[in-house]
Image: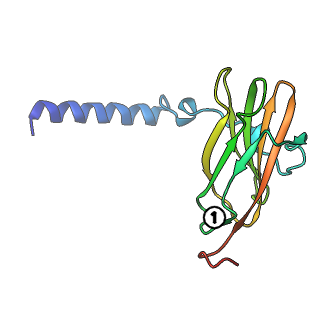
Amino acid sequence: MKRRLFMKGTLAGSAITVALGAGLLAPRAVMAAWPTTEMEHKSVDKITTGDASGTVTIKAPAIAENGAVVPVTVDATGIDGIVESVTIVAAANQRVVAAIYHMQEGAVPFVSTRLKMGKTGDVYGVVKTASGIVHAKTEVKVTIGGCGG
């Protein structure tokens, strides 16, 4: 190993360690804020106010063999107008809001993600538009070990 490279690495590492110790590089200053008002809902009723519509489709497996990775897709491309946000809600979880996606103007309102579900329950795809809120739901049965029961 080259001596100059070793010295540069050592000095850079010690400078970062001193900055962390002094509080100059606090993780809270770097990380994004947690949207408390949106993510802390305990009830599905407040979130799913609106019409159940055929313009929003949600795809999820009827039986999920592993609750740690449940694939969910929400498609709102059939909605006329501008979609402001797409929210995925897992009703059986302790914190029901699983994900919120804020859409920019002109974005395609199609979201695909994986959720963690502790037990069997309904999964909602809630779409907020300028004219109101529409949603779709499907039931996902979470099995233990893929036994189907």
- The reply, left or right, for residue 107 in relation to residue 22 is right
Q: Is residue 55 above or below residue 62?
A: above
Task: Find disc 1 in the rendering and name its residue.
Answer: 67
Residue at 69%, 40% (x, y): give it. 75
Residue farthest to the left, as pictured:
2
Q: Secondary structure at mark 1?
A: loop
Q: Quadrant of residue 99?
A: top right
Q: Position of residue 130 (x, y in %)?
A: 83, 24
- The reply, left or right, for residue 6 in relation to residue 72 is left
Q: Quadrant of residue 77?
A: top right
Q: Position of residue 108 (x, y in %)?
A: 64, 29
Residue farthest to the top, as pictured:
105
Q: Is residue 130 above or below residue 73?
A: above
Q: Position of residue 21 (x, y in %)?
A: 44, 36
Q: Position of residue 5 (x, y in %)?
A: 15, 32
- The reply, left or right, for residue 7 in relation to residue 147 is left
Q: Nearer the viewer, residue 29 or 88?
A: 88
Question: Mark 1: which amino acid?
Answer: Gly
Determine crowd level at label 1: few under 14, some 14-19, many 20+ residues with C-alpha closer than 10 A: many
Residue at 75%, 23% (x, y): give it. 82
Q: Nearer the viewer, residue 86 or 23?
A: 86
Which quarter of the image is occupied by the C terminus? bottom right
Which quarter of the image is occupied by the N terminus? top left
Q: How is the image coloured?
A: rainbow
Residue at 56%, 34% (x, y): give it. 31
The number of discs equals 1
